[in-house]
Amino acid sequence: MNNIYKAHCKGYHDTSLQKMIENYFYSERDRLAGARRILIKPNLLSASIPEKAVTTHPDFVRTVIRILREYTEAELWLGDSPGANFGKYDKVLEVTGMTKVAEETGVHVVRVESFEPVSRGGIVYSSLAEEVDIILNLPKLKTHGLTGMTLAVKNLFGLIPGTAKVGYHRDFPVDTELAAQLYKYFGILGHKTMNIIDGIIGMEGDGPSKGTPVELGIAAASSDAVGLDIAVTRMVGLKDEFCLTTKAAIAAGYDKSHIDVPETNIPLIKKSLSKKVYLPPFLKQLVAKQVYVKPVVLNEKCILCMLCMKSCPVDAIAVINDFPFVDKKKCIECFCCHEVCESDAVGLERSWLHKLVVGK
């Protein structure tokens, strides 16, 4: 049974973080020593500075790499596929601080899209995952407008290349269906993962990209990604199944009885607007069209990069009067456009009934 290692940290240079990583790596020392090549897989969703808490913090990644070298002589690669800006990968690496991390630590930066896609059981992902012995998965603790939370299981979505990610949103527009497919995908690669979550500064509210940074002081690690996700979800005061990939895992038979409830004084984090309302099924059918949160382009902030259009799985965004415009009737509320916009130009518009049910 895989242990779950936890630390409460006052910052990224706290010795408790280093000690927790050392304890985790020591428990996996034989596995690390036998590896030939390891992929370090942070969350690099977009070209966002570390202070926004959109991506895994560079100091977190730097500390992990430094300690990792004490346990392995494996070749170290670092890579991820951003949400929609994968065509400007160098910019993403530079802004997130990963270029400097790679230069200082000597790790080799790889591009997910440079490896041929492979398909297994109808699931497409980058063959990069086949080229390594271990995927050292370094997710950022964030709320997520579609899956509730984005943690260890969800972070592997970044090994799906380029526009193939859009296809998942198109084919599985319902949040629980998408989460179930993500867990199915995790089942292919999960055995390769070692997982360390960066929640020292996390994100609450409208994650995974437009939420508010919050100092949580959480770092946690385990080779059981689902168990780790459950423990961290509890640590921030939420129910296990609020994280929909965890809900999918439990539905598929994952036994969570061995996971202790972590002791924590961390306050409940704020949920995304799209996850604040619960309606009984019979009532939901009656008012679903009136209770909604839809993306809207804020022209005054828009820089016309068109990442929102590129990310939309149902072509609900078109240029009207020189700016992108969201067709609310076509929109399936996947929030991909909101997630990938790097200029904060995609806001969320709530229906009057959503405001009445949820409040401010």
Image (cartoon, rainbow, N blue to C red):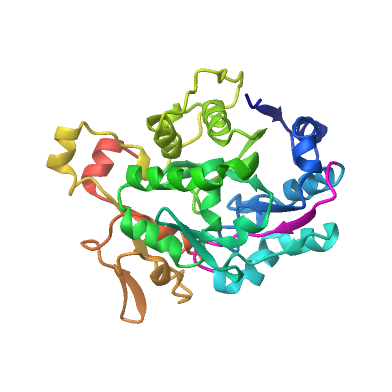
Residue 240 image point, x, y percent: 45, 28
Residue at figure coordinates x 33%, y 60% from the top left: 170
In the depicted structure, whether residue 315 falls above or below residue 5:
below
Q: Is residue 354 left or right of residue 20?
A: left
**Residue at the limit of the structure toward the right, as seen here:** 70
Residue 153 appears anywhere in the view: yes
Q: Is residue 36 left or right of residue 345?
A: right
Residue at figure coordinates x 41%, y 53% from the top left: 121
Name the quarter where the N terminus is drawn.
Answer: top right
Label count reads 0
Name the quarter where the C terminus is drawn.
Answer: top left
Residue 300 image point, x, y percent: 43, 71
Q: Which residues are magenta?
A: 71-85
**Residue at the limit of the structure toward the left, as seen here:** 286
Per the image, is 69 magenta?
no
Residue 192 image point, x, y percent: 62, 44
